[in-house]
Amino acid sequence: MRRAMQIIVPFVLIMAFIGLGYELFFNPLGFLKQLLFIAGFVAVVYLLYRWYLSRRYGTSLFPSRQGPTKAQIRKAKRTSTVSQPIFKRQPNVKGPNRRKAQTKRSHQRSPLKRRDDHNLTVIEGKKNKKKNRAFF
């Protein structure tokens, strides 16, 4: 089945391309009619698909956009009072100064926080019973 589809689909596409090219050269008005027919067919299929999804999920056929638009988001970012951190690139430092900067950073580590104890409990059971390997 898969092998047949690998042959049939390209064949149909090639034949459609040849047919459209023939119509374009020898019957341009027919070509335009054919394009309008194809566009109408695609529009009908799309509307049926949207109608099916709206019936299945209980939404409207053409849902309205919810939330802010991109322009509103940009304006909110410009007028925001909360300042976002600005990261500046540090110049490349070569030679011994670079090593000094790295050693200084390693000594300035923040102390590690202690974690809480785990919540594991021991469940008593038959620890000496061998497992039946046939079921695994």
Image: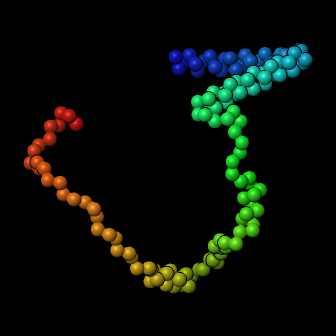
Residue 94 % position (x, y)? 59, 80
33 vs 50, left or right, is: right
User: Going 44% across and 79% down the picture, which residue do you hit?
Assistant: 110
Return the x and y of residue 127 as percentages of the image width and height: 11, 50
Label count reads: 0
Asked whether residue 101 appears in the rendered view, the answer is yes
Residue at 68% of width from left, 25% of height from top? Answer: 48
How is the structure coloured here?
A: rainbow
Residue 56 image offset from top left, x and y in percent? 58, 30
From the viewer's side, name the closer residue of 11 and 110. Answer: 110
Q: Nearer the viewer, residue 48 or 86?
A: 48
Give left or right: position of 78 versus 24. Answer: left
Q: Position of residue 19 (x, y in %)?
A: 78, 16
Residue positioned 22% across, 59% down in the render: 121
Residue 24 in view here: no
- Above or below, comparing residue 3 to residue 120 in the picture: above
Extreme left residue here?
128
At x 71%, y 19%, the residue is 14
Q: Is residue 129 left or right of residue 49?
A: left
Please tell me in which quadrant of the rendered image residue 136 appears.
top left
